[in-house]
Amino acid sequence: MQQVKIGIVGGGTVGSGVVRALERNGGLMASRLGVRLEIVRVAVRDARKRRGAELPSAIVTGDWKTVVHNPDVQVVVELIGGTTTAREVVLAALSHGKPVVTANKALLSAHGEELFAAARANNANLYYEGSVAGGIPIIKVLRESLVGNRILSIRGIVNGTCNYILTRMKLEGIDFAEALKEAQRLGYAEADPTLDVDGHDAAHKTGILASLAHGFWVQPREIHTEGIRGITRLDIQFAARLGYTIRLLGVVRTISPGRAPAKGARKRAAGPGIQVAVYPALVPDSHVLASVNHAFNAVAVRGDIVGETLFYGRGAGGDPTSSAVLSDLADAALDLKHGSHDRVPAFVPHDRGGHVVPMDSVPCRYYVRLAVLDRPGVFAKIAAVLAKAGIGISSIIQPEGHEGESVPVILMIHDAPDGKVKGAMARIATLDNVKGPPVMIRVEGAGEGA
Ligand code: NAP
Ligand code: HSE
């Protein structure tokens, strides 16, 4: 049977997971594909580190170049993370015309366009199923299965670490730091966990999904990004009392549909304006995303023809990510077998008029928690500021049982441009009887594509 020889750069959580997974199911894959995948080299930072029985010492090296430049290696798998050496590894492999598999969303987010161009220039391909949502095959879904749809919205829980932390804070009342430590122990978190908790990892993934869905590469700086550090158990509890669960969401939504050029006009067609953002949000308990717990991910995609679809699975950890890497290896092996490196190109730019709408003008709904002095007339002053800004309130609640100098007041705000709500809240913070800055968390709708 034909063999495809693989070199892996990175033997950590995912790298050793891929080795284990191929040991377990390599025979099955060979019988399905008619090609046997064989790992011939694995590069790590420290070749002398004890790694148990996971990586056979004979194939382990401390020098990634000996993997990439090895003439026997036909496919290079980059699993070291980061954007510096990883970029060198991928470019070096592509320059030899070798297909590359990566799970590195930070790298793609920062250098996607350059890497895809290098792949095209060298008649090689770049596969990245493992980069978004772990074991959920969402890249394939957007590139292949939903290729006949305009994508109207994507809403996803795409960071397992944050979802794990929020779940444990809600269900067990444990604190943020303890939950993060546990996520690190379980291999969910990035080497630098600030990438997870500050929303950057979710932004990398959301940007990749947005780019695939809309055909222009979304730059990291265009993605409005908030993490979960500011989410307290108090807000998780208040949200629960109101029938919501707090989740970190990646959101891609068409805000303006774009337009064709007027007949005879010289102006180019304007592409769609899209929202691309990551933020914690109150999700109604009736919505399926609210019941996605622990390190699970879920991505809801709405297409103009298919309607609403939902993809669910384990979003972080060695095994689910290895499953995605194996699927890429299978594609790479079949492409080598059939000499078809561009059967499904890594990324095809196709909507150069598309653009990201600044967050300030995106309509958002909010949960706002204020600390106020319990005096007559406070509500009236708050309501007056909002009325002047043209912002509607759907409810005001003063939860009972809170004593002290100030008491919490929860406002639920109707849809209004994000910048306008923030401006009004900054004015409310300066009112005499309002203590401290308001806590503001967006609220997602329950409806289809809301
Ligand atoms: P990890 O556990 O920290 O492993 C990184 C590996 O890369 C280690 O084996 C390390 O060697 C090796 N390495 C680092 N620098 C190197 C260099 N210059 N040359 C050779 N080897 C080097 O990371 P991971 O969790 O497996 O993540 C790998 C990639 O997959 C990242 O891009 C990550 O974002 C992505 N990813 C991870 C997950 C997950 O759940 N963990 C899920 C999806 C995607 P030593 O072992 O000697 O230190
Ligand atoms: N740190 C990432 C997460 C790994 O927690 O989702 C999977 O990409």
Image (cartoon, helix red, strand yellow):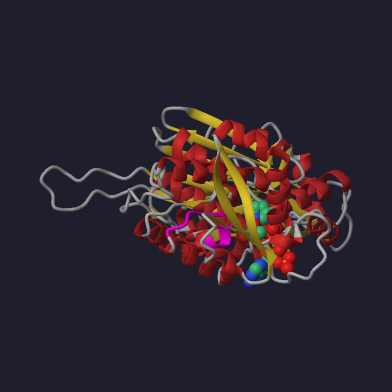
Residue at 59% of width from left, 41% of height from top? 36
Q: Is residue 106 on the magenta stretch? A: yes
Instruction: Residue at the far top: name it.
Output: 306
Q: In this view, does 115 lie to the left or right of 353?
A: right
Residue in front for this viewpoint, 221 or 400: 221
Q: For residue 226, say whether it is visible.
A: no
Q: For residue 56, say whether it is visible.
A: yes
Q: Give the range drawn in magenta.
A: 97-107
Residue in front for this viewpoint, 416 or 308: 308
Could you say where residue 126 lies in the image, as x and y percent from the top left?
Answer: 47, 53
Instruction: Residue at the far front: name it.
Output: 1
Residue at 56% of width from left, 68% of height from top? 83
Could you say where residue 407 lies in the image, as x and y percent from the top left?
Answer: 81, 56
Q: In this view, does 329 lie to the left or right of 430?
A: left
Q: Is residue 239 left or right of residue 404?
A: left
Residue in front for this viewpoint, 434 or 414: 414
Could you say where residue 440 lies in the image, as x and y percent from the top left?
Answer: 66, 56
**Ligand 1 is found in which quarter of the picture?**
bottom right
Could you say where residue 17 lies in the image, as x and y percent from the top left?
Answer: 72, 50
Indicate the quadrant where residue 26 lies. top right
> Which quadrant: the N terminus?
top right
The image shows a total of numbered marks equal to: 0
Q: Is residue 446 on the magenta stretch? A: no
Residue at 36% of width from left, 47% of height from top? 272
Q: In this view, does 119 lie to the left or right of 448?
A: left
